[in-house]
Image: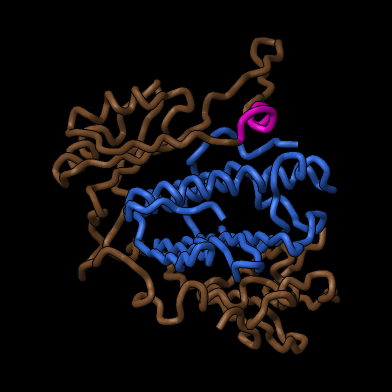
Chain colours: A brown, B blue
Amino acid sequence: MAAVTNADVEVVDFDLDDDDLMDEDAGAEPALPPAPASRLRSTIAGDDAPRKTKGRGFRDDPNSSSAPRDSRFGDGGRADFDSLGSGGGGPAPIRSIEGWIVLVTGVHEEAQEDDLHNAFREFGQVRNLHLNLDRRTGFVKLVNNLRWKHIHKCWFLIYHFSVQGYALIEYENFEEAQAAIKELDGTELYSQIISVDWAFSSGPAKRRNGQKRYSIVFLYNFGFLVGK
Amino acid sequence: MATGGGGAGAGAGAGDGEFYLRYYVGHKGKFGHEFLEFEFRPDGKLRYANNSNYKNDTMIRKEVFVSPSVLREARRIIQESDIMKEDDSNWPEPDRIGRQELEIVMGNEHISFTTSKIGSLVDVQSSKDPEGLRIFYYLVQDLKCFVFSLINLHFKIKPIQS
């Protein structure tokens, strides 16, 4: 367990030759000076507690993809990205290309597409439905959900049916989606309470009162750039 | 062993506090730097980038603000995986086949894991830390599935597996 205890980056001897992805990449051969400082450092402004950090990403690794991250995501931020015009003002639901998307959470793992379809078509035609099942099936999941319980002097092995999934549902009209949210949020499906809400928003999430506002800043070593 | 955490699902633990998530998978080869990357920022901005030069494909970059409910669901998926308890020190190092990076800030924990591409569970089983790597492997699949659904429904594009 090589846990690093704070945001300062541990400089670890890292063998560049083992990882020479860059060498055969014609036209993108950065003269690799050994990266002098920390590759990745994160600062969460307003957080006084020391942050526990873990992983190779905190080591000095010039081959990491992270360094040119902003060139992949685009330097200019918003302008480089396609996004469906977000209006001004506070966050509000936003329309997707072909309709309005609703997120359903707390969906019982045994619920089928049909069950959701039946519940949601009451408010309008369901144009698309993605019910994503947890892939952590089999042994891992089984173990996670088995608990010993001591009931009446006996030990029982209980299987917890608390695993939840989610679904994304598309309606053509705002009113249909809004009605589904209003009527189905907090209702039961397979004896489990589901939450129904908009999936997309026109702007940054508003912080609740009394909560500190955090901002996350990642500083990278830009001594090395991939591509052009 | 997988104990603790409870079956509370999207309960208290998954609720408040700082949250940031970034996943990258990619390699550099015949078709240049091909990769897939996405991130959820604390303010709800979801960014997605996918680049392949195969058949002159161009870079796809998308971004959209997601609702707090979507962020909470991402958080729940991570919480239930127990990935924050793992460590990448015994995972395969990235190689010329490719690399994966998973960076998560949740509460006062910050992980930044790096490993090679994982082809299948066979690679997981033969590694030095099959239990930890399996958690990573499934979590990545769940996160990709979530992001692909969101991007696909919002923009009506089919994200390409990288």
Residue at the farthest left position: A175
Q: Residue at x 72, y 75 (%)?
A: A24
Give the vertical position of B40 relative to A102 (above or below).
below
| Viewer-nearest residue: A24 or B158 | A24
Q: On the image, which quarter does residue A88 sit in?
A: bottom left
Is residue B141 toward the left or the right of residue A81 in the image? right
Q: On the image, which quarter does residue A115 sit in?
A: top left
Residue A217 coordinates in the image, percent (x, y)? 52, 76
Residue A16 coordinates in the image, percent (x, y)? 81, 76
Give the vertical position of A85 relative to A74 (above or below).
above
Give the prevailing secondary structure in the magenta stretch.
helix
Q: Quadrant of the C terminus of chain B?
A: bottom right
Residue A64 showing in the rendered view: yes
Number of numbered discs present? Answer: 0
Magenta stretch holds residue B40 = no
Is residue B130 toward the left or the right of residue A189 in the image? right
Q: Residue at x 75, y 89 (%)?
A: A33
Q: Quadrant of the N terminus of chain B?
A: top right
Is residue A93 toward the left or the right of residue A154 in the image? left
Give the vertical position of B73 relative to A34 (above or below).
above
Q: Residue at x 60, y 46 (%)?
A: B139
Residue B95 coordinates in the image, percent (x, y)? 76, 63
Q: Residue at x 16, y 44 (%)?
A: A173
Is residue A4 toward the left or the right of residue A159 in the image? right
Give the vertical position of A68 relative to B162 (above or below).
below
Looking at the rendering, the stretch of residues picked out in magenta corresponds to A136-144
Residue B18 showing in the rendered view: no
Residue B30 coordinates in the image, percent (x, y)? 64, 67
